[in-house]
């Protein structure tokens, strides 16, 4: 992300230098406003991402929810592969209710769906 901002800034710099050196406004009129807008937006994204990442507590402070060494060892212990699929954990009744809800939405709210 930082590299793309630097490339956009370099493109703006070269367009302005060409305008000063050769009096050629083609790069200034067309590209510079778009490059400046994208550069400002990407810069804001980087600043907000940095703020979000630095506001998280360090992992040392969070003791709850940590796996012990034995739990990690049991999770990664070698096992024979299972040749049967896992049991279906989604109950049939709940599946039926979900399908009825989807049908209701498609029947009564068809005009509000995108692409209709």
Image (cartoon, rainbow, N blue to C red):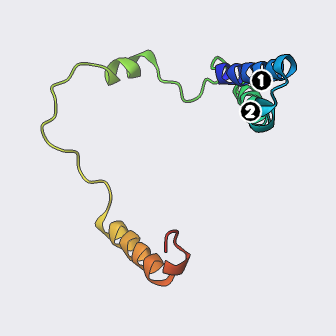
Name the secondary structure under disc 1.
helix
Q: Quadrant of residue 73?
A: top left
In the image, residue 1 sits, relative to residue 94, either above or below, namely: above
Disc 1: CA contacts within 10 A as few (<14), some (14-19) or many (>=20)? many
- The residue lying toward the viewer, choosing from 14 and 22, is 22
Q: Is residue 104 left or right of residue 88?
A: right
Q: If you read the primary sequence from the N terminus, does the residue marked by circle 1 or circle 2 appear first?
A: 1
Residue 18, how many percent across, how many down? 79, 20
**Pointer 2: residues within 10 angstroms few (<14), some, or many (20+)?**
some
Quarter of the image containing the N terminus? Answer: top right
The answer to whether residue 61 is visible is: no
Residue 94 pos. (x, y %): 37, 67
In the rendered structure, are the residues bearing label 1 and label 2 in contact, judged by CB atoms less than 8 Å apart? yes
Q: Which mark is residue 52?
A: none
Residue that badge 2 annotates: 35
- Measure the alpha-carbon separation of dots 1 and 2: 11 Å
* Residue 51 percent coordinates (x, y): 76, 28
What residue is at 53 percent from the left and 25 percent from the top? 66
Left or right relative to 64: residue 75: left
**SS for callout 2:** helix
Residue 29 visible:
yes
Q: Residue at 49% across / 75% down in the picture?
A: 116
Quarter of the image for residue 90 reads bottom left
Between label 1 and label 2, give the one nearer the viewer. 1
Question: Pointer 1: what residue?
Answer: 15
The percent position of residue 47, horizontal first and vertical second, equals 77, 28
Report the front residue among 70 and 100.
Answer: 100
Residue placed most toward the observer, 86 or 115: 115
């Amino acid at each position: 992300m930082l590299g793309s901002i630097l490339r956009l800034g370099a493109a703006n710099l070269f367009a302005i230098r060409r305008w000063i050196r050769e009096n050629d406004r083609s790069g200034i009129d067309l590209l510079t406003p778009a490059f400046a807008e994208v550069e400002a937006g990407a810069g804001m994204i980087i600043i907000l991402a940095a703020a979000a990442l630095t506001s998280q507590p360090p992992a040392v402070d969070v003791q709850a929810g940590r796996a012990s060494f034995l739990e990690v060892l049991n999770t990664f212990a070698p096992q024979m592969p299972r040749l049967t699929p896992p049991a279906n954990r989604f109950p049939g009744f709940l599946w039926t209710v979900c399908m009825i809800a989807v049908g209701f939405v498609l029947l009564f709210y068809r005009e509000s769906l995108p692409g209709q």
